[in-house]
Image (spheres, grey):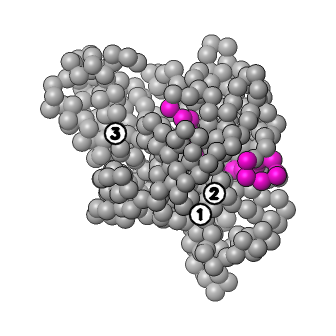
Amino acid sequence: PPGLREDAARALLPQRCAAARRRARAGRFARIDLGGDRPSPRFGHSAVAYGGGLWVFGGRDGARYHSDVWRFDVTTTAWRLVDVAGPAPRRAHTATLLGDAMVVVGGGDSRGALGDVWRLALTNDVKWTKISESFASTHSDRPWRAWGHSAVGLEGRDDLVVLFGGASNSGQVFRATNDVELLQITDEKGVRALVHAAEGQPPPAVYRHSCTPLGGDRFLVAGGYTFAPSISSEELDGGRGIALTYCTARAYELRIVRGTVRWAELSFAGPAPFPPRGGHAACRVSHDTVFVCGGGVMTAWLPEDVDRPREEDVDSCYVLTRVDETAWRCEAACCRMPHACGGHTACVGVVGDDVGVVVFGGRAYDNTADAHAGRDDMSVFSFLDAEDVALARGDLVDPRDLYNLSL
């Protein structure tokens, strides 16, 4: 809120402000005690932070797909089931905060990809509104349908969602895309994909990647699952490329400038290269700094690799910092997640006396059983040390002030 940053700066000594920023790069993981009711285990769900709460929707656990909505109160650390009828069960959809509402786009279930658009009002009268059953893509004559895509809002616009990538499957045919859709959403006109120009070389067809807002018209698109370069488009259209999917380590800056989509591939310097991964979570933790946690690693698989694990989840975390227009620095974080998982959610927020990256749920993948079980635990990658927490508890400073300083 306006003025909060200035109030926090007056409340803290300058050296403590600098220390809080440094710890946004170091940090520590701490589990959050979730007694009582809580969402069932899940992965591929969505989460947005709004109004002192973390709103979670959907997801998957084994063969079960969810459509429930839960709110986590960051002050009391208690979950509440929001009893409201809405979209069909799904996973790998997106949820984007537009004004006072959460907009859900697409996703998938056991039958395939979805293309509907819903809005959940997050005010006192919480309710779902179906905006559209489907919308026309600007890149093909087929209606848009996808799961594993990304969706972000454009700063200064409460009616525009930027969609990128994603995958769809119908029968034995599996497709991924590198298309961008500028989705205008209004109560009067519903959903409309805006025609736009494009500049630069886009990423390859990718899904289960991350797209992190960097402020203004800039976004960081990183990682994801893609296809071995030896697979032709004809083979992909025939559905024969799925056995050669793998995780990419490539990253791009996406800009939306006056209706033009601009791409620029990024390079990484520093002690660690950006690792290949997909199904990870990423969020901006300070100016030009992005925190990446967990995810899965998939390698291209051929018949002769039958004894090699096809995919595994990881617990490593990385901090990405901009060096210049096209170069970033990649550093391994000082600690790992409490467990390996992918398909989790991560939001920057305040929980009780702590503040940092709040991680919920995720996949507990098992190669031997080909399992897709979910998790129901929560942890926070804290930006504060013990002294900061003691100050907050002593009412000398609100942890929300430190949170705003870190941004």
Q: Evaluate if marks 1 and 3 touch, with contact meaning CB atoms under 8 Å apart.
A: no
Q: Are marks 3 and 2 in contact (CB under 8 Å)?
A: no
Q: Assess whether residue 149 is covered by the magenta stretch.
A: yes
> For the point 55% across and 65% down, which residue is it?
247
Please name the predominant secondary structure of the magenta segment in the image: loop
Q: Across the whole image, how many numbered discs are drawn on residues?
A: 3
Q: Viewed as shown, does residue 88 lie left or right of 306?
A: right
Q: Is residue 211 visible?
A: yes
Mark 3 — residue? Answer: 287
x, y percentage for residue 309? 58, 73
Reading the image, the residue beneath label 1 is 204
- Give amino acid for label 2: Asn
Depth order, front residue of 229/262? 262
Label 3 secondary element:
loop
Where does the image place residue 155, in percent across and percent down from the top left? 50, 32
Measuring 55% from the left and 54% from the top, which residue is drawn there?
199
The answer to if 118 sits in the magenta stretch is: no
Question: Could you tell me the amino acid type at mark 3?
Answer: His
Q: Quadrant of residue 329?
A: bottom left
> Which residue carries the number 2 mark?
178
Closer to the chain start, of discs 1 and 2, is 2
Of discs 3 and 2, which sits in the foreground?
A: 2
The crowd level at tag 1 (other Cα within 10 Å; few <14, some 14-19, many 20+) is some
Q: Which residues are magenta?
A: 138-155
